Amino acid sequence: MSDNWLVFVDTNILLDFYRFRGASALKQLKALEQNRAKLIVTEQVQMEFLKHR
């Protein structure tokens, strides 16, 4: 399998972290942090996230 992949994260995915509780949320955030070079997050998604959190 190739290691050349990218992941687009939309606003709903980011906002889900506020719905998760405890270790589950931390585990998901850690996974995103470890792979941040492969994430695509647009400016629009960032603005929507900040507006709705």
Image (spheres, helix red, strand yellow):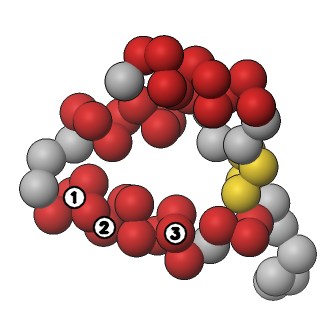
Give the mark nearer the N terminus: 3 vs 1: 1
Q: Residue furthest left?
A: 22
Residue 33 is labelled as 3
Circle 2: is it few (<14), some (14-19), or many (20+) Cα within 10 Å?
A: few
> x, y (%) of residue 25?
26, 54
Give the mark nearer the N terminus: 2 vs 3: 2
Q: Are marks 2 and 3 in contact (CB under 8 Å)?
A: no
Q: Are marks 1 and 2 in contact (CB under 8 Å)?
A: yes
Residue picked out by circle 1: 24
- Number of numbered labels in the structure image: 3
Query: Which amino acid, by three-letter code, is at mark 3?
Result: Glu
Q: From what the image shows, is residue 25 above or below residue 9?
A: below
Q: Residue at x 49, y 26 (%)?
A: 50
Q: From what the image shows, is residue 40 above or below residue 34?
A: above
> x, y (%) of residue 28?
37, 60
Spatial separation of the CA atoms under disc 2 and disc 3: 10 Å
Q: Nearer the viewer, mark 3 or mark 1?
A: 3
Query: The residue tagged with tag 1: helix, strand or loop?
Result: helix
Query: Which amino acid, by three-letter code, is at mark 2?
Result: Lys
Check the picture and name the quadrant holding the N terminus: bottom right
Spatial separation of the CA atoms under disc 1 and disc 2: 5 Å
Determine the image quadrant of residue 39. Answer: bottom right
> x, y (%) of residue 8?
73, 45
